[in-house]
Image (cartoon, helix red, strand yellow):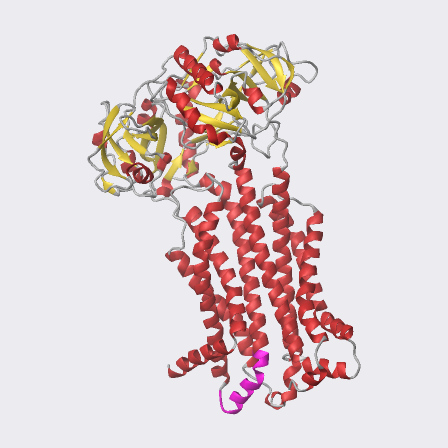
Amino acid sequence: MYSLAQDVRYAFQQARKNPGFNATAIISLALGIAATTAVFSVVYGVLMNPYPYANADRMVHLVVKDNAGEERWIFLTGTQIQQLRQAKFMESVAGQDEWSLTTTGEDVPDNVEAVDFTGNAMPHLGVPALMGRALIPADAPEGQDPQPVTVLSYLFWQRHYNGRTDVVGHTIQLVHKTYTIVGVMPARFTWGDGDVYLPLKLTADHAKTFFPLVRLRPGVTHQAANAQLQAIFQQFAKETPTHFPKKFRVQVQGLNDQFIKRLGSTLALLFGAVALLLVIGCANVSILLLARGTARQHELAVRAAMGASRSRIVRQLLTEAIALSFAGAGLGVLLAYRMVTLIVRWLPEYSFPKEADIQVNLPVLIFSVGLALFTGICFGLSPAIQFSRPELAQIMQSSMRRLIGGVRGKRTHNVLVAGQLALTLLLLTAAGAAMAGFIRLARTQLGYDPHNAMSVGIPIHENTYGTWEARSQYFTELLARVSALPEVVVAGISTNATPPNNGWSTGVEVFGNPKLEQPQIRLNLISPEYLSVLRIPLVRGRVWDHAETVHGAHLALINETMARQFWPNGDAIGHQIRFPEVKPEPPYGFTVPSADSWVQVIGVVGDARDDGLRNAIKPAAYVPYTFAVRMWTQILVRTRVPPLSILHAVRERIRDVDPDQQVTGDIRDLDHWIRREPEWAQGQFVTVLFGAFSVLALLLAAVGLYSVVAYGVAQRTSEFGIRMALGAQGRNVLREVFSSTATSVGSGLLAGLVLSILFNGIVVHWVEGGSRNPLIIVVVMFLLMSVALFACFVPARRASRVDPMAALRYE
């Protein structure tokens, strides 16, 4: 124990004697551990432990796939939910509904997203309240009207009540109805992104549907659930055919399946990148330890001559290496806390569960400490063994100290440097592929103009504007009020028609062409001004007028893609199409009479992105928004000033029409709609992080190469002095230094090139939209070669200017 304490004390003495060496080694290791710990924190929070709900691994979403392969979430009637509860493979089934509400009876109305739960929903989710209680079955008795009580979300409690601890027992008025607050949920309970949670009554009305919350019994696999649900849903589809595709197959999904699909490969790729960064950092420390071990051969020989055993020398060197690793791990964990915050800020919106608690927690800390121990032993063992048995006869001759540890030591340095450069080249190539893909995405032709335009969501309250006439007139008046603002160039209605991912996927029939079996198109409900707001050109034909809009005329525009696909040999104008799936669904939507009858095509418009930024544009049709008036509509506004600057004025005009009506809380201009598209956000995320990690790897590789060359120059100072004294020129010394590193740099670049070619397919596959352009590898190799030359040039230049007399006195 005493000798171990001596080893630790001596290690600290060595650290004080060589602050530059230790700072370089600790920072090299800290950067690798910080990046690895931060990314592992995100992986753990998003993929391993994202939900606070009880038995979350057995909770599933009910999803079906139609003939086109598109996934649809299933909504069930109250009767169907009750029938599903009887299935033997179901442990628990609850129902959910959602509406946008507003607070009333207060000076400033507040937008409120309400989630309505059946009485068993919160026990189903199994999260206890932070204050008060959660909703219980007695709040929504079967077949009876629910109690006027509510539970607040944590964020709404903080926002609306400033976190007051006496809020339980108080009342809140939502659209003129008073509710008693019975509890506040904890921060991680964000189900449905609700602000308030209200009790829900299931009805037998087939037009009213609810979102089912399902938990399977223990031991029931997703495949078994799919098979049994297929038969049940086939029966449900006969009862309510409009709620299901004509042909479908059930494919239940776990709560996290969608997020794993969106972000899993990206996080795996990033984890691989930071693992490479850690390896490069460890290689740096190994290089430094080998160099320091070589410099200390004389000291180790003296200790051996004085009776120190090989095991004692190994233990001393290992103690110093592990002390370095723990110092690097400590700094790395501190940096990881900041890095986790940055990564979470850059994560694509809606790509991970909001319930996820992403932070450096206990499992991550254990991972970091284990990583520190492993790396300390790994990169400390080889130098310790190598220098624990010094050649006393040679090393005691002081002139031999400049031999850089002999041929074996030089070979080890070269291998480590080459490995660093190879891995750095692989990282830079992957980053280049991601950047090139993102640049290509940013240059995508949109087909519309998003600048100086915004989308203002108008959610209709429950039990308001309950007829087609009332709702149509309401939106017409809203549009007129907003259009009259002096800052507004033009405004239009866009019911789920805001690009670049817009329209409902629905089947279409073409009159006189029975061969087409209802292919899927994108259906958009718009006002005539919509095309002017987005500056989508009318290629041919005409647009319906105001009078036709008021009456919900059976007229349609189609995009060029649909015109080419459906009428390749002629003009589409004058032909008729039909949307058999468009039917009235009160209270969510009202349609004009005979909405499923034939609609005449009167014009063709230019293609605009309607299926994201990367997918091909889909066939699309545009009909008057009065054709099917939904409860959720947007007003698109093109302005003469920055759009968000007039948002307050727009809200005022909307309240002038209906004082209880609010707009959605998350209003963005259309440029930001593009930035929150999954492919844009994910491309930006990968590009930023890969770029940052690659720059760090490049710096570490440069430091490693510089350390090797600088140490070699220092050990050969007397040699260079003798050469200079005998008439050698500075350029000869420069050439000698560069040639000593040419093998390691060249082999590293060659190995990196091979790795980049081998892994290019994997990187492009995992980095969506990544580029296979070989020019990227050429540019990256040139960059890395330039950095390597610079890292060699600095110590080489110093060697070429050495004073011969000073060099001869070096020993």
Give left or right: position of 708 versus 80: right
Is 353 situated above or below 667? Answer: below
Is 490 situated above or below 787? Answer: above
Residue at the (34%, 17%) spot, across then down: 464
Front-most of 749 and 232? Answer: 749
Q: Quadrant of the N terminus?
A: bottom left
User: Of all residues shown, which one is farthest toward the right?
Assistant: 727
Does the rendering let one see residue 519? no
Could you say which quadrant of the image residue 810 lies in? bottom right
The mark total stands at 0
Residue 427, position as x, y percentages in the image: 61, 54
User: Main SS of the magenta segment?
Assistant: helix
Front-most of 730 and 296? Answer: 730
Is 139 situated above or below 574? Answer: below
Magenta stretch holds residue 14: no
Front-most of 253 and 270? Answer: 270
Residue 399, position as x, y percentages in the image: 65, 87
Could you say which quadrant of the image residue 366 lies in? bottom left
Residue at the (47%, 68%) spot, across then down: 325
Residue at the (43%, 55%) spot, across then down: 337
Does the rendering let one see residue 45? yes
Magenta stretch holds residue 301: yes
- In the image, the segment drawn in magenta is 293-308
Residue at the (60%, 35%) spot, across then down: 614
Front-most of 761 and 359? Answer: 359
Residue 232, position as x, y percentages in the image: 39, 26
User: Of all residues shown, which one is farthest toward the front?
Assistant: 486
Residue 274, position as x, y percentages in the image: 53, 56
Q: Quadrant of the C terminus?
A: bottom right
